Image (cartoon, rainbow, N blue to C red):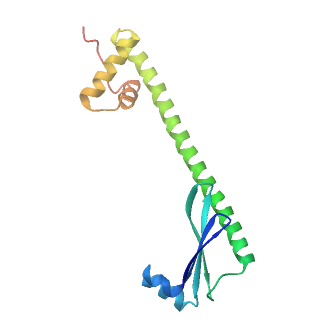
């Protein structure tokens, strides 16, 4: 038994467990062996974004009572909002971390430009050109070269010296 129902814009799928054998015998077998006879899939959706389904396994076949579907929709809505909120927080934390890394790298590069300008006796723009050429010639990241310059692990000389 397989039925699709449109209810308030949400597609609900009702499947008898034996129909799941088309999907996977192990799923159907485990469900049936544990006393389940049907499954309802409630979409987890916010506006146009669907992130999955809330699956309800039931011991009898046929349509579930309307109050059960209403509760299931409420659970699906709350779970969707929670999952999307957590995903949004994780993305914000990742972006924040990337921006902090970029800022730290930029600070280190500015410090290194000053060191090279002083030690090589060149103007700041030329110090940056020396650093960039050094990094490119050796296949290094500019931030790595800058850090090594500030730690005094490497010293760049003016091309005229």
The furthest residue to the right: 67
Q: Is residue 114 left or right of residue 70?
A: left
Q: Nearer the viewer, residue 88 or 46?
A: 46
Q: Nearer the viewer, residue 160 or 80?
A: 80
Q: Is residue 86 visible?
A: yes
Query: In front: 67, or 6?
Result: 6
Numbered marks: total: 0
Residue 51 image-quadrant placement = bottom right
Residue at 67%, 62% in the rendered image: 77
Q: Residue at x 43, y 84 (%)?
A: 25
Q: Does 144 sit left or right of 45 as displayed?
A: left
Q: Nearer the viewer, residue 94 or 157?
A: 94
Q: Quadrant of residue 2?
A: bottom right
Q: Where residue 21 sits in the image (x, y, percent)? A: 45, 84
- Please determine whether, in this image, residue 83 is positioned above or below residue 137: below
Image coordinates of residue 101 in percent, x first then y, are: 49, 35
- Across and down, in percent, residue 136 comes to 28, 27
Picture quarter with the N terminus: bottom right
Q: Position of residue 91 (x, y in %)?
A: 55, 47
**Quarter of the image that includes the C terminus:** top left
In the image, what residue occupies the spot 58% across and 88% down? 37
Instruction: Please say if 158 is above or below 104.
Output: above
Note whether residue 161 is visible.
Answer: no
Q: At x 37% / y 18%, what residue is drawn?
A: 128
């Amino acid at each position: 038994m397989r039925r699709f129902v449109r209810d308030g814009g949400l597609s609900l799928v009702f499947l008898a467990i034996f129909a799941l054998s088309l999907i996977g015998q192990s799923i159907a077998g485990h469900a049936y062996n544990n006393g389940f006879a049907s499954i309802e899939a409630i979409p987890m959706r916010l506006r146009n974004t669907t992130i999955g389904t809330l699956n309800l396994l039931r011991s009898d076949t046929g349509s579930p009572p309307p109050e059960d579907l209403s509760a299931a929709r409420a659970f699906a809505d709350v779970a969707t909002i929670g999952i999307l909120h957590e995903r949004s927080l994780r993305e914000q934390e990742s972006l924040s971390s990337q921006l902090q890394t970029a800022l730290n790298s930029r600070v280190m590069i500015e410090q290194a430009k000053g060191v090279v300008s002083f030690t090589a006796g060149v103007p700041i723009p030329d110090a940056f050109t020396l650093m960039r050429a050094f990094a490119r010639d050796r296949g290094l990241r500019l931030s790595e070269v800058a850090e090594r310059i500030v730690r005094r692990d490497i010293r760049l000389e003016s091309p005229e010296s």
